[in-house]
Amino acid sequence: MREIKFRVLSQGGTWHYGELFRHVTQVSDAHHTMRHFWEYFAHWRMETLGQWTGLKDKNGQDIYEGDVVKIDILGTALKYNPIEALLHTIKWRNACWGWEPIHPRLICEEDREWAAFWRQEDAELWDANYFEVIGNIHETPVSR
């Protein structure tokens, strides 16, 4: 079983990684727990909350929901102009992790939709060497 972990940006602009409810569930009193729960989450920018996909990119960096990744399946990134055609956002959809192109108009029509990491027709997981995390949707300016 894979490790379940999250990341979230604090109100102060620092990323925090790990278990989401570990600190909250350690309190036994129910009333105190709810108060502690809301105080705990008041420190975070909840719109930045993202779960780890369980995968790492070609550099060994964890891939999280909301990451912006460069996908280079054919090894042609240096020839691609514009490079934006290779940029995708990591998302959870249809009960699995996948990616969606940030600039769909720059790529061929069949690749413009969301795609899953697990390709059932090939019965394989995409190779981590295809992916490189270059930022996230919360800090990396990307326009559609």
Image (cartoon, rainbow, N blue to C red):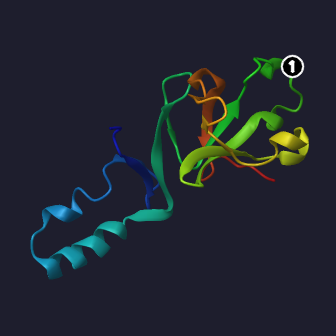
- The answer to whether 134 appears left or right of 108 in the picture is left
Residue 91 vertical placement versus 71 (above, below): below
Quarter holding residue 70 = top right
Residue at (53, 22) in percent of width and height: 59
Q: Position of residue 130 (x, y in %)?
A: 65, 24
Identified at 81% across, 37% down, the residue is 84
Q: Is residue 64 left or right of residue 127?
A: left
Q: What residue sits 23% from the left and 78% below the top?
A: 35
Q: Pointer 1: residues within 10 angstroms few (<14), some, or many (20+)?
A: few
Q: Residue 9's spot in the image, x, y percent? A: 46, 55
Identify the amino acid type marked 1. Lys
Relative image position of residue 75 (x, y in whole percent): 75, 17
Q: Quadrant of the N terminus?
A: top left
How many numbered callouts?
1
Q: Nearer the viewer, residue 143 or 100?
A: 100
Q: Is residue 6 left or right of residue 38?
A: right
Residue 118, image x, y percentages: 58, 37
Residue projecting furthest to the left:
28
Circle 1: element type: helix
Q: Is residue 58 above or below residue 109?
A: above
Horizontal arrangement in the rendering, residue 46 relative to residue 122 (left or right)? left
| Figure quadrant of residue 99 | top right
The residue that label 1 is drawn on is 79
The residue under the point 88% across, 33% down is 82
Residue farthest toward the bottom in the current orientation of the protein: 31
